[in-house]
Amino acid sequence: MRLEKLRKEIDGIDAELIKLLNKRMETTLMTKNFKEETQDPEREKEVFEKIQRYSGGTLSKEFTNELYMKIISESKELQKKKLKLIGFQGEHGAYSEIAVRTYDGNAVSIPHKSFSDVFEGVASGELDLGIVPVENSLAGLVSSVNDLLTKTDLHVIGEIKVPIHHCLLAYPGTEYRDLKVAISHPQALSQCRGFISRNKLEAREHYDTAGSAMSVAKDKPAATAAIASSLCADIYNLEIIKENIEDCKTNTTRFLVLSKEPSKEKGDKCSIVFSTEHKAGALFNVLKEFSEAEINLTRIESRPLVDDPGNYAFLLDFQGSVEDSKVKKALVEVQKHTATYKFLGCYKEAK
């Protein structure tokens, strides 16, 4: 029993090591946009001097030197590949990462703590692109992302719609009948309320769906499972106890793709953000221009302006290309009725 316990502890340490190595490689890749060459002898010398100071205990300096020679070599090889870096909010395995993989299966997904970190990463050049959720078919708009869209200078160059299918995940070997607790993000718990109730599970809130899977894999809490994506099962080596446990099978999240540069492709859907004077009929005058041009609106949301209490910014999506003459003409007329106006982008509509 003691040997088995120690081996399980080693397995957990190995998982953490791999996770940290992945994070190091991801961070190394983010430096590629800020330097011309992958070779940097001065930086390598600095790294080796530091790891010599860190070495100790059972780790010999020779071992850490050899280990880091391999790590740095792999880092340089990755940088040479010029892989596209796409940022998302959450832990690996989040539905946002599924959106990244849906958009570009060859890109490297880079996790970030907050949505603002994703926006800043794209703006600074650390990331090539960012992918963020704007609305869910059940929960509605993602307020913090829409607020960031009203202030950003980034461009929207694409959209992805991801079906949300939740799984019950547990540590391998866990008996289904022994489960008493399900942990996940509050939204995921509410979307699986029927399943949780039927199986007499206690719902416990967690900061993130993928984070709940990571917690189950790392801490192995007794009688506890996570509600997260099937991707999390692969990433965190968890067993899928039950698939598609959501109450509504048509649950979908819409994501937008962010870039420093506008899309070079001809799009068929556009997004704008604007504000109007605080007077009767101001918004109506804007919407009338789209109606008269027979342009179909697909979304309109209002967000309060933090620096202008009582006034609102409006986020509006419509079908059509900015290259079409009727769209160009309508947007010229729209701007006559707005106090502020920004064209976010024209992109391919997700089917």
Image (cartoon, rainbow, N blue to C red):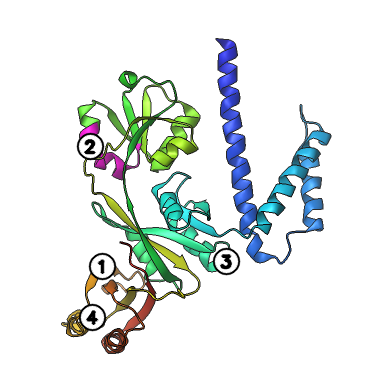
User: Is residue 258 among the parts visible in the rendering?
Assistant: yes
Of the numbered discs 3 and 4, the one sitting upstream in the chain is: 3
- The residue at which mark 2 appears reads as 193
Q: Which mark is residue 111?
A: none
Occupied quadrant, residue 343: bottom left
Question: What amino acid type is highlighted by mark number 4?
Answer: His
Local crowd size for mark 3, using a 10 Å CA cut-off: few (<14), some (14–19), many (≥20) = some
Q: Is residue 243 above or below residue 200?
A: below
- The residue at which mark 4 appears reads as 278
- The residue at which mark 1 appears reads as 301
Q: Is residue 84 above or below residue 152?
A: above
Question: What amino acid type is highlighted by mark number 3?
Answer: Gly
Q: Is residue 44 left or right of residue 273?
A: right
Secondary structure category for the residue under label 4: loop
Image location (x, y in percent) of residue 276? 27, 81
Distance from the alpha carbon under mark 1 to that under mark 4: 17 Å
Residue pictured at 68% horizontal, 58% vertical: 80
Local crowd size for mark 4, using a 10 Å CA cut-off: few (<14), some (14–19), many (≥20) = few
Residue range (magenta): 184-195
Distance from the alpha carbon under mark 2 to that under mark 4: 42 Å
Question: What amino acid type is highlighted by mark number 1?
Answer: Glu
Mark 2 and mark 4 in contact? Answer it, CB < 8 Å. Answer: no
Of the numbered discs 3 and 2, the one sitting upstream in the chain is: 3
- The residue at which mark 3 appears reads as 125
Residue pictured at 35% horizontal, 69% vertical: 306
Between disc 1 and disc 4, the foreground one is 1
User: Is residue 313 among the parts visible in the rendering?
Assistant: no
Residue pictured at 60% horizontal, 37% vertical: 18
Q: Main secondary structure of the magenta part?
A: helix
Secondary structure category for the residue under label 1: strand
Of residues 310 and 270, the one drawn nearer to the viewer in this rendering: 270
Mark 3 and mark 4 in contact? Answer it, CB < 8 Å. Answer: no
